[in-house]
Amino acid sequence: DAGVIQSPRHEVTEMGQEVTLRCKPISGHDYLFWYRQTMMRGLELLIYFNNNVPIDDSGMPEDRFSAKMPNASFSTLKIQPSEPRDSAVYFCASKTQGYGEQFFGPGTRLTVL
Amino acid sequence: AQRVTQPEKLLSVFKGAPVELKCNYSYSGSPELFWYVQYSRQRLQLLLRHISRESIKGFTADLNKGETSFHLKKPFAQEEDSAMYYCALSPSGGYNKLIFGAGTRLAVHP
């Protein structure tokens, strides 16, 4: 198993552009999480899904951010329009039901110029 | 408010020295606490969880509810322990919502 897969691994874009980050969770996992990591704020949970349904999006910073999970094997995090302060590493993680460990992807390093 | 505090951004020690990475939390209920580690060029991964009461790679962590702390300790540091360490708290059952501290970088010098 390749683990959680994220793409792209690096993204450089200009302010105002739309950015889409992608995640493929581990097969059979019921939960999917999106995190953002910055120097100032550390690792923050943005949103998580259970069986493709968003459960808690209280960490989503503002309306410019949206996340979807159309099926059990794919999720997107979209930023529109992007701003320089969105520059960060975005992680996706997945887990099974119950008291299982969260498995993290390699992250996407986003730079907004 | 639910919060995890790791007061040190960087901890620098020599090989063979004892290590203690500090973690304090703020939570009104019974917390589930974890340590995650990220080695260079590797993914963030679970190191240990307090409920397991186990030692992983020589590391242990004891939950002190009186001091609201969950410090990570190792008696003799190794160079391969150099990594970024994150303390995390789960405020609900199922280990779903994790609140992370800012992280501490451990550098072990030869």
Image (cartoon, coloured by chain):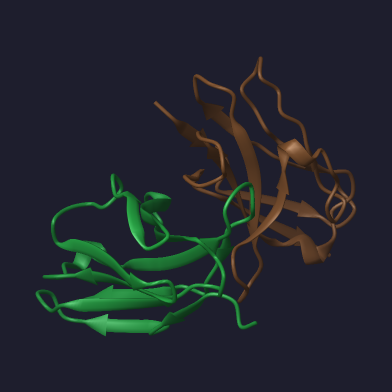
| Left or right: B39 in relation to B9 | right
Write down the quadrant of residue A103 in the picture. bottom right
Apparent side of residue A42 relative to residue B13 in the rendered image (left or right): left
Q: Position of residue B10 (x, y in %)?
A: 60, 50
* Identity of the residue drawn at 52% across and 75% down: A106
Q: How many marks?
A: 0
Given residues A68 and B61, the one toward you in this image is A68
Left of B12 or right of it: where is A46? left
**Quadrant where the N terminus of chain A is found in the figure:** bottom right
Chain A as rendered: colour:
green
Q: Nearer the viewer, residue A51 or A3?
A: A51
Q: Residue at x 46, y 73 (%)?
A: A107
- Comparing A111 with A97, the one in front is A97
Give how far across and how far down residue B82 sits, in percent.
72, 62
Colour brown belongs to chain: B
Position of residue A11 measured from the top left corner of the image (x, y, whole percent)? 32, 83
The quarter holding residue A92 reads: bottom left
The image shows residue B72, relative to residue A102, as above or below, that is above
Return the x and y of residue B1 as percentages of the image width and height: 39, 26
Residue displayed at 9% across by 74% down = A16
